Image: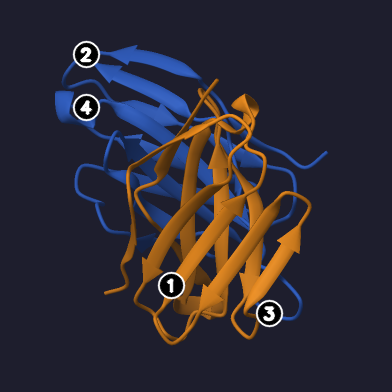
Amino acid sequence: DVKVTQSSRYLVKRTGEKVFLECVQDMDHENMFWYRQDPGLGLRLIYFSYDVKMKEKGDIPEGYSVSREKKERFSLILESASTNQTSMYLCASTALAGGRDTGELFFGEGSRLTVL
Amino acid sequence: GEDVEQSLFLSVREGDSSVINCTYTDSSSTYLYWYKQEPGAGLQLLTYIFSNMDMKQDQRLTVLLNKKDKHLSLRIADTQTGDSAIYFCAERSDAPGGSYIPTFGRGTSLIVHP
């Protein structure tokens, strides 16, 4: 069974703390994504990566950074957490485009972060 | 940039049909998708349609694509309480490295009442 695993379902952090959100996929996918989901705003892309050590900014990268040292792992880092980063964070992966690939995204269960 | 629009809420009675609508802007989209998110979970692909198709049917689900108007719809026949969820429309746009980025709408919350 294919899987995208996010390390923490729920986290509570204090303002100014450094936060690591980890995501691992077992499908040998090239592309990995981090989104945040807020009510009424849908999914907003923070960063994505299409290869090891490659990263591209999404729509809302400010206040975030990412790391992709291995193909299966994509980490989201909040260098200094702020209350406006309280949100649900979703990781997703997909194979590289081409051929008969439909581009289906596989999502993790999400990490709900509360910053106090 | 690309934009995907959909209404935020839809309420239907159990047994009725539900129709969720979506408009998109990227005319070069090759695939369009419907994802479903149940409470407390990530998104799962419900169905997709290739851009050279007008319609796709899969059991209770019917997807209609009007490329001229850039309009996508999802019809759920005989809607059940288990269909209550958030439904996201998404399109696929090219990105660096031969990759692509899916762009999502804000999601339509489907509420099914007895």
User: Which amino acid type corresponds to the residue marked 4 in the rendered image?
Assistant: Ala
Relative horizontal placement of residue B32, taking residue A62 as reference (left or right): right
The residue that label 3 is drawn on is A98
Provide the secondary structure element on which disc 3 rests.
Answer: loop
User: Which amino acid type corresponds to the residue marked 3 in the rendered image?
Assistant: Gly
Q: Which mark is nearer the camera, 4 or 1?
A: 1
Percent x, y of residue B66 = 50, 79
Residue B71 is marked as 1
Chain A pictured colour: blue
Q: Is residue A39 above or below residue B33?
A: above
Q: CA distance from mark 2 to mark 3?
A: 43 Å
Relative horizontal placement of residue B103, taking residue A30 as reference (left or right): left
Query: Looking at the rendering, which quadrant does residue B114 occupy?
Result: top right
Within 10 angstroms of label 4, few (less than 14), some, or many (20 or more) residues?
Answer: many
- The figure's colour scheme reads by chain
Provide the secondary structure element on which disc 1 rests.
Answer: strand
Q: Residue at x 55, y 25 (%)?
A: A7
Near-viewer residue (B85 or A72):
B85
Percent x, y of residue A55 = 42, 61
Provide the secondary structure element on which disc 2 rests.
Answer: loop
User: Which amino acid type corresponds to the residue marked 2 in the rendered image?
Assistant: Arg
Percent x, y of residue B43 = 56, 41
The residue that label 2 is drawn on is A14
| Residues at marks 4 and 2 on the same chain | yes
Relative horizontal placement of residue A14, taking residue A50 as reference (left or right): left
Could you tell which of marks 4 and 2 lies nearer the N-terminus?
Answer: 2
Q: Chain of mark 4?
A: A
Q: Are marks 4 and 2 in contact (CB under 8 Å)?
A: yes
| Residues at marks 4 and 1 on the same chain | no
